[in-house]
Image (cartoon, helix red, strand yellow):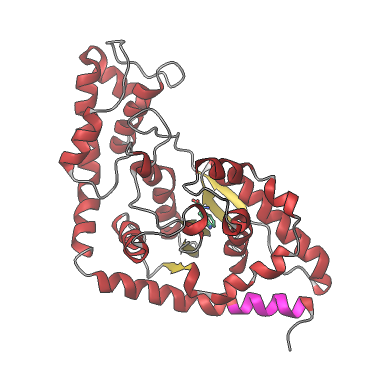
Amino acid sequence: MLTGDRPAGRLHLGYYFGTLQNRARLQDLAVNTFMLIVDYQVLADRDVAENLSGNVEDLVLDYLAVGLDPAKSTIYSHSAVPALNQLLLPFLSLVSVAGLGRNPTIKDEIKHSQQSAVSGLMFTYPLHQAADMLFCKSNLVPVGQDQLPHLEFTRTIARRFNRRYGVGGDVFLEPEALLSSAPLLLGTDGGKMSKSRGNAIALADGADETARLIRGAKTDSIRHITYDPLVRPEVASLILLAALCQKLDPQDVAEEVGSGGSGELKKVVTESVNEHLAPIRARRAELGRDRSHLRDILKQGNQHANPIAERTLGQVREAMGTSY
Ligand code: TRP
């Protein structure tokens, strides 16, 4: 299993319930797990990545806090695995410029980009992401819905490479997406939850900050609380958050609050989030005291990933007739 994260800030609750929990579960089922910190890809939508190494360390810290274990999972970064990056060159020969431009996720990211011009990195990053997934022959990729075009693209690249060069047998597997069954959590403003939009609760936020964010969350004017994601999306998302934290059915949470209204709902949500996150936050604070330990974990992961990438690149060069 492989998945990747951009080191662009601390991870939030939507991410935790959407994918991190699932990864920790798979890791504990002894699935061979790779967690890639995409420190090149983070440059796709900005000129300079501020505080890059600090963000990389924070990501490692979030991983550890939620139970990802470097003894079981390989945690490593793009920039430290040269053979992975070299796969990009043969892959570039397998796609047309028009084909790159058709990717709907890229189109959306270009729209929200902080840059005035689209960089070559933005345009080609799905191909880089294909290299991420293919370098270790991953067959399972836990991702959100927005990443499905990248997975389909990666499968196409694997097929094209195999067809063009795999005379002696296929070099690449076609990975499958693993979608989380947890419904989507909204940000406190009712939009997509994102740290950069100021509407997300981070794993690392304190209990008071969590209370403040939930107090300001958007609700609606109907007093009686009911769970109705289609008609009352903001209220439903708050109910869902409490339900996920307490491992309860959202309907039951809604009935419990009932005529208590949104004030009571927010109280319940704040308490359940803070209670659920307390051990994670304590672990995070404890582990965060030793930043050099975080670096060591990355070094160890890089050391594990490099020979795997070299082996795959060796097979690619062999298939292409370029292993001199
Ligand atoms: N593009 C993904 C994101 O923005 C991150 C990512 C990079 C990724 N490489 C990956 C995800 C490989 C899954 C597999 O969140």
Q: Nearer the viewer, residue 181 or 300?
A: 300
Q: Residue furthest front?
A: 116
Q: Quadrant of residue 303?
A: bottom left
**Residue at 60%, 61% in the rendered image:** 128
Q: Is residue 94 left or right of residue 278?
A: right
Which residue is nearer to you in this view: 138 or 206? Answer: 206
Instruction: Point out residue 4 in the picture as x, y percentages from the top left corner.
Output: 49, 57
Q: Residue 66, located in which quarter of the rendered image?
A: bottom left
Compared to residue 317, the image places residue 113 above or below, namely above
Percent of width and height locating residue 294: 30, 69
Q: How many marks?
A: 0
Prevalent SS, magenta region: helix
260 is within the stretch colored magenta? no
Q: Is residue 91 above or below residue 46?
A: below
**Residue depicted at x 38% and y 43%:** 17
The C terminus, quarter of image? bottom right
317 magenta-colored: yes
Q: Residue furthest bottom?
A: 324
Residue at screen point 73% across, 50% down? 99
Give the quadrant of residue 132: bottom right
Left or right: where 265 falls relative to 49: left
Residue at 23%, 26% in the rendered image:
266
Q: Which residues are magenta?
A: 310-319
x then y, percent, for residue 231? 44, 15
Foreground pick, 228 / 59: 59
Q: Residue 110 placed where, x, y %?
A: 56, 45
